[in-house]
Image: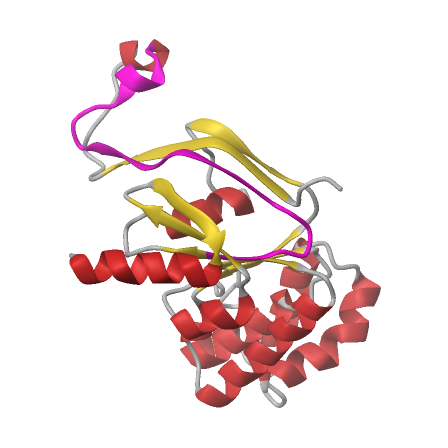
Amino acid sequence: MSAAIEVQDLGVHFRRNRRGRRSFKDLFAGASRRSRPGEFWALRNVSFSVQPGESIGVVGRNGQGKSTLLRLVAGVLLPDEGGVEVHGGVAPLIELTGGFVGDLTVRENVRMTAGLHGMSRAEIASRYDEIIGFAELEGFEDTPYKHLSNGMKVRLAFSVVSQLDEPILLVDEVLAVGDKAFRDKCYTRIDELLADGRTLFFVSHNERDLRRFCTRGLYLDKGVLAMDAPIADVLDRYNADYNTH
């Protein structure tokens, strides 16, 4: 069975500010020579594979490359070194409210966003009521998206994306938003997706959520993969390192 996600020698670097410019000469220099003052490697030499049906939790302090790794896997960010191969479609529960159009109604946004993620018109029609019901937006279907509260926007986005049939689920801190009742619904929905054999790639600072959903952990520290092990061992290592700083 081929891996769901394969990451090999992955590296990406950023500027700390946007003022720095590269010269024409820099474009033809090797990667090691291209680094300039004010640039840093957010990730470097990261390699791992994820098998279908695995539940992976990505652990690390702020600024250690967790969300960057998720964006690379999602394909919304390109690496400077190495590569990422994803075998199967992705349902991205990251930056949830991105991609929705403020002047369009809730109904129009559901149709547009689900369609952009590859759902057919027939599938959208058959799942529309469930999407609206899960988001608790009955009565708001003709309301412009920009007039929704932040909580409503997050509920709508989670509801649409969690209806996708893609085999790989990418989750980035989305369970930290919304009220407890809606978080409980999200937990139940993710449990259902995992029971259905989906692959989970989960970034969170919530240790309880990581232990609940994940069996394996990746510990990122200063942009490198410091540990790849069962989630309990990774969290123990992370807590030990954190408490010594």
**Which x, y percent locates residue 207?**
39, 70
| 234 displayed left or right of 166 | left
> Which residue is at a point 46% across and 72% down the rendered structure image?
209
- Which of the 4 image quadrants contains residue 130? bottom right
The one nearer the camera, 168 or 53, is 53
The one nearer the camera, 18 or 193, is 193
**Which x, y percent locates residue 85?**
61, 36
Give the extent of the magenta segment. 29-57
- Is 37 covered by the magenta stretch? yes
**Which x, y percent locates residue 84?**
55, 36
> Which residue is at a point 49% across and 73% down the rendered structure image?
154
> How many numbered badges does the structure rendering display?
0
The one nearer the camera, 105 or 136, is 136
**Image quadrant occupied by the N terminus:** top right
> Which residue is at a point 70% across and 46% down the rendered structure image?
88
Can residue 95 be seen at all in this image of the molecule?
Answer: no
**Which x, y percent locates residue 227?**
40, 47
Residue 27 in the image: above or below residue 188:
above
> Which residue is at a point 62% across and 65% down the rendered structure image?
161
